Amino acid sequence: MDQRIENFDQLEHFLDRFTLIGGGGTDFRPAFSYVNKLVDQNVFRHLGGLLYFTDGRGIYPKKRPPYPTAFLFLDTYDESAVPPWAMRLQLEPEEFMDRKQCKQERKGRNHYEYQTGETRD
């Protein structure tokens, strides 16, 4: 499913309706080819990066794409299978799925705090 997300509210809306499924054996390369094509067509002029939610079992691209890429895992994964150019983040399912609590904790934070985890004086 394609979903263009341009701001935090759109991300919240998407994640509230997002369902993760998996089973291994994914070929990640077609998704990267598709995104690369969109970049070449200027559909994404300022692509900030690609987030790939996965169980980690699959075929990764060998070549680093021209945009930051993070693979997000909800379970343990084979570290050696993930390309060295990729960012990795293992999510805790209860943290990822408990959206209401996360929203409440974020109330009152400014955009800078959310993105960096730091505050400005």
Image (cartoon, grey):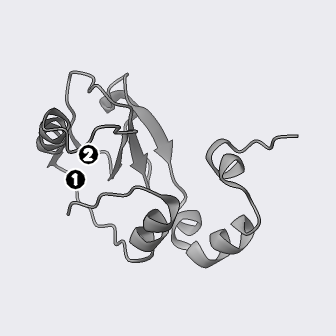
Horizontally, is 103 left or right of 65 in the view? right
* Viewer-closest of 68 and 111: 111
Q: Are marks 1 and 2 in contact (CB under 8 Å)?
A: yes
Which residue occupies 64% across, 69% down? 102
* Quadrant location, the C terminus: top right
The residue singled out by tag 1 in the image is 24
Between the residue at mark 1 and the residue at mark 2, the CA separation in whole angstroms equals 5 Å
State the SS at label 2. Answer: loop
Where residue 11 appears, x then y in whole percent? 45, 63
Which quadrant of the structure image shows residue 86?
top left
Which of marks 2 and 1 precedes in the sequence?
A: 1
State the SS at label 1. Answer: loop
The residue singled out by tag 2 in the image is 57
Q: Amino acid at mark 2?
A: Arg
* Quadrant location, the N terminus: bottom left
Where residue 113 appears, x then y in whole percent? 71, 49
State how many labels appear: 2
Point out the residue furthest to the right here: 121
